[in-house]
Image: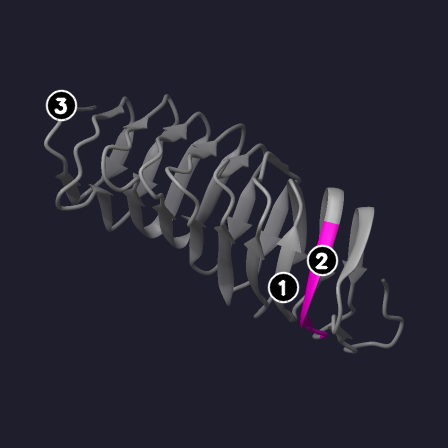
Amino acid sequence: INTTAINSSIAIGAAISGTTTTLTALGTGNVSGAGVVTGTTAVAINAPTGAVNLALATPSITVTNGGAGSVTLTDSVALTTNGASTIGTGGFSFTDSANGGITTSANITSTGALSLIDTGVTSIITIGAGTVSGTAVTLTGTGGNITLTGAVTGSTTVAINPTGAGTITGAGAVTGTTSVTLGNVGNSGLITLPTVATQNLTFNTSAAVTIT
């Protein structure tokens, strides 16, 4: 679905579906609506400086956004891959309700805040190839493990909380210029990260912690 008028928006009033579903607005045009957007293979969203607020059912996303734009997405299917994505200063929020959780496979770059949130049962978060970055970066799970193969970078803060017995492990670098917070009070999963760069580190777990 494409708009051709500059700064015009796309409103999804009812469910739409395809194999790869693409939504393209121009300029400051927004992409939003109550209808669920299904892409059995992928969903691609292009909103150069607009606001995006959508409910998805897809295993793969690619987002092109910038300027003062913002992107808020919910997904009912486990995310298994993503295309390289950029988001504006309004920030990026992605919430996945599937038990399979969230796996990224390419850069997600926000010039505002960035949040990846699981709401499924013991859902995982895996940062695969590439880097997820923003000003304040938050990864929040529901008891599943958080694995960092790729990097997590916050120009201000990074907060990673798997919740409960979920672990935080992987070879990916974690950088929080102001602070890095790992786990939360009451957590019991081990934390093992070989590369953490910050001036203020906080960790909360009853299990072993290995950080270099």
| Pointer 2 with pointer 1, Cβ within 8 A | yes
Residue 117 horizontal side relative to residue 107, left or right:
left
Residue density around tag 3, few if under 14, some if 14–19, many if 20 or more, within 10 Å: few
Residue 33, compared with residue 154, is above or below; it is: below
Q: Amino acid at mark 3?
A: Ala
Check the image and report above or below for 5 versus 16: below
Magenta region: which residues? 29-38
Three-letter amino acid code at disc 1? Leu
- Determine the image quadrant of residue 106: top right
Image location (x, y in percent) of residue 100: 50, 35
Q: Is residue 11 left or right of residue 34?
A: right
Circle 3 is placed at which residue position?
Answer: 208
Residue, far right: 4
Residue count near mark 1 (Cα–Cα under 10 Å), binned few <14, some 14–19, many ≥20: many
Residue at 54% x, 28% y: name it: 129
Where residue 37 is drawn, which disc sits there?
A: 2
SS class, disc 3: loop
Residue 52 x %, y %: 63, 66
Nearer the viewer's eye, disc 2 or disc 3?
2
- Which of the numbered marks, if any, corresponds to residue 81? none
Q: Which mark is residue 54?
A: 1
Q: Give, as a three-letter code, the residue at label 2.
A: Val
Determine the CA span between mark 2 and mark 3: 42 Å
Task: Indicate which disc, 1 or 3, sits on the residue closer to the N terminus.
Answer: 1
